[in-house]
Amino acid sequence: MTTAAARGRIVIDLFTTLNGVAQAPNGREEDPSGDFRFGGWQSPFDDAVIGQDVGDGIRRMDALLLGRRTYELFAAYWPRHVDNAIGAHFAEIPKYVASRVGLEASWDGSTVLTGPDVTAQIDALRDRHREVHVIGSIDFVQTLLAAGLYDELKLWVHPVVLGEGKRVFPSGAAPTTLRLLAPAVSGPSGTLLLRYGPGGDVVAEDLDPEG
């Protein structure tokens, strides 16, 4: 349990292409919505640097927060793989799922966050946990980004371009700036890890040619 003076953090973890597509990086059936043809596009770029950072993040998290679609995928898979270090850790920590529609939380240790005050419920997780991670859940992530309801956005940017798929920052995304939290880290596959925190409002003005 954290104190009011030391609130926890909400960390968003996303695999993304160079042009910002984050849909279904891990498998063909992960999210085929919109007739997406490239499910599993991340697999050829896996390397030790990425794996180490992903593993470190999972070990640090003491709660998992997911959107409905990703929750259903995880709930169907990870309870059957508790012999795996990731599955074992997920089994031990609280899981939260944000959903606009009725949802039965079938995964042991799960809580559904819903209703008109769902953003307040999400923010309150910072008072209950040290480090809450949001994995994938690209549709749900749009809500967090628009509300500035996160402390760190981790993007593993892969050297591939896709002309279709759900993007981290789609057309119509809320205008905002981001603040770089640490220097970029690169892996042997050519993937970059970028870590950002919320910035301020966008300032649009003419460039001063004398500046």
Image: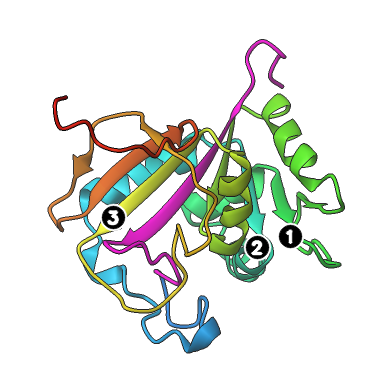
Q: Residue at x 52, y 85 (%)?
A: 34
Secondary structure, magenta segment, majority class: loop
Q: Amino acid at mark 3?
A: Val
Q: Residue 184 vs residue 107: left or right?
A: left
* Crowd band around label 3 with a 10 angstrom C-alpha radius: few (<14), some (14–19), many (20+): many
Q: Residue 129 at what x, y percent from top left?
A: 66, 29
* Amino acid under disc 2: Tyr
| Mark 1, other Cα within 10 Å: few <14 / some 14–19 / many ≥20 | some
What is the C-alpha distance between the residues marked 2 and 1?
A: 9 Å
| Residue beneath disc 2 | 71
Q: Which residue corresponds to mark 3?
A: 157
State which quarter of the image contains the C terminus: top left
Image vertical order of residue 42 relative to residue 95, above or below: below
User: Is label 2 or label 1 in front?
Assistant: 2
> Gap between marks 2 and 3, in whole Å?
23 Å
Residue 165 placement: quadrant: bottom left
Question: Relative to residue 185, is residue 172 drawn left or right?
Answer: right
In the rendered structure, which disc, 2 or 1, sits on the residue that comes first in sequence? 2
Residue shown at 43%/54% (left/top)? 14
- Residue bearing the label numbered 1: 107
**Label 2: element kind:** helix
Disc 2 and disc 1 in contact, CB within 8 angstroms: yes
Q: Could you say which quadrant of the image residue 206 lies in?
A: top left
| Residue 31: numbered disc | none
> Upstream in the sequence, badge 3 or badge 1?
1
Q: Which residues lie in the magenta part? A: 1-25
The percent position of residue 174, horizontal first and vertical second, equals 55, 50
Q: Nearer the viewer, mark 3 or mark 1?
A: 3
Tag 1: amino acid: Trp
Q: Which tag is nearer the camera, tag 2 or tag 3?
A: 3
